[in-house]
Amino acid sequence: MLGKLLKHEFKETWKLPVLVCVLVFAVFLATYWYLGNIPPAASEDEISMAAMMAFLLFTIAVICGNFALLIYLAVRFYKNLYTDEGYLMHTLPVTPRSLILSKLILSSSWMILISFEIFFTIFPVMERFFQLLSTDPQISLYTALGEYISISEFVLLVVVSVIISSISSMLTIYASISLGQLFGKHKVLASVLCYIGFSAITQIITSIFMTPYMVSYVITLDTTTAAAASFQFWEFFRTILWIGVGISAILAVLCYILTEYIMKKCLNLD
Amino acid sequence: MNNLVTVSHLTKKYGHKTALSDLSLTLNRGRIIGLLGPNGCGKSTLIKCMNGLLVPNKGEILIEGSKPGIETKKKISYLPERSYCQSNMQVRELLSYFSDFYENFLLEKARAMLADLDIDEKSSLKSLSKGTKEKVQLILVMARDVSLYILDEPIAGVDPAARDYILKTILTDYSENASILMSTHLISDIEAILDDVIFMKEGQILLSTDTESIRAEHGKSVDAYFREVFAC
């Protein structure tokens, strides 16, 4: 039955995510082309206002696209499972697990797709943008990055963190919406407050785990040379990212358990 | 075993308000049962508990010996009082949806009923009137071959001609081992096809009997007796 749920979920939801991905790519192409046609800075002190604006608009468009997709997927989950449509979904001969997984697999896939799209489009744009700011035509973001972290580890870190954070963010939304349904009134508001609560708790836990590394980083910071400081920063940054990925994974598991429990044991459709 | 549904000491509360209070009930096979009562008496709550859409605080529901779950969802065809289909779907997409998920969905029967009521399969739900949407939902529900049909206000929004067609369909198309539990306020319209009635008041069963007994003992139609019992 999971396959059938996935098939119908895809048929009913593919249009907006595809549109968002196409729009983000169109904005990327326009920005990349525009940045390539602006003359580079004449001196170190000169900053191209047009380049700054183009980069800013690209960043805003990408954030809006990502946010719009997230909101759409959250509303889809809420509407399909906890409003009138829930009367059909919860009377299908399928388990709550299949219902959650069908939504999760597709939503996470869309979020992963747009995250990779953003990642792979933002680097070329940044590359062109920094070239415009620099008077040295040989400077490259990729070369600079490669000095501090191996490309294979960087790609692994990005792939793992994108996958885990996409799944985790969808499950946090699912758990918040499901918790909100337990309230007698103002269920949407309750869901939003639950989401804020989850986010706050996650931030606190993340901070607690990261504090020892931050203290250690500050104490042992080697400022004798810029290269040593940069190397140390990347080491610290890498550790922090892996801790973030680990906490997201734990949060995802807890949110999944909570969502499934509520759907199995506490379902209360108005 | 003639018992299709057994409800034992069912209690459901919404906060401090009790919707169902220690309710016990048995439904037999092969009957058309009217679930009747004033607004807020707990009819929809009972129906939702049977369908697993609400979790009761106490008590148990057994449908052919199973608690509400995947097995009972295969055996129950449920029409809620609201529109549960996505409005952007076409009627033919709904047919495909029901065919995919319900092994006992009779596609040709559904198509014949749609044709009888002159509903185009290519229409999207949002282009249909409220009454036509209700007809589509009822067709989808009645085109399943199940043990129990639960219909919550099935004819409230449709015109009298379609109402007659629907009642005729209900009467002729269900198997003799199946039962229909129907909640409605339009008692006079459905009285002729009811075998049994259940009167509910304040979350409890006030009366559960067959329609002939009401007519014989009280010398009144079910509609008239209902008005007498629930007179304000």
Image (cartoon, rainbow, N blue to C red):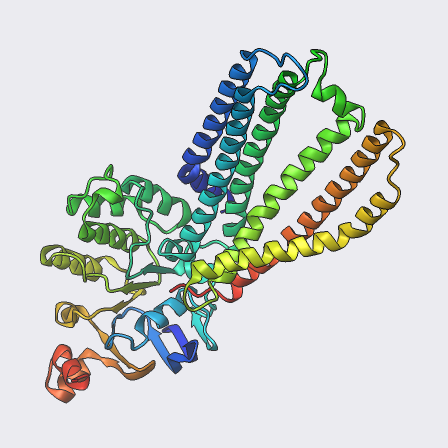
State whether residue B149 appears in this view. yes
Residue B89 lies left or right of residue A133; in this view the side is: left
Residue B157 x, y percent position in the rendering: 18, 58
- Looking at the image, which residue is at 39% across and 82% down? B21
Residue A113 x, y percent position in the rendering: 56, 32
Query: In the image shown, does A157 or B47 lie closer to the viewer?
Result: A157
Is A6 placed above or below B13 here? above
Outermost residue, front side = A45
Q: Which quadrant does the N terminus of chain B fall into?
A: bottom left
Instruction: Say how many tags the image has.
Output: 0
Query: In the image shown, does A192 or A114 lie closer to the viewer?
Result: A192
State whether residue A5 appears in this view. no
Query: In the image shown, does B173 or A37 lie closer to the viewer?
Result: A37
Residue A200 lies left or right of residue B114; in this view the side is: right
Query: In the image shown, does B24 or A23 lie closer to the viewer?
Result: A23
Residue A94 x, y percent position in the rendering: 48, 53
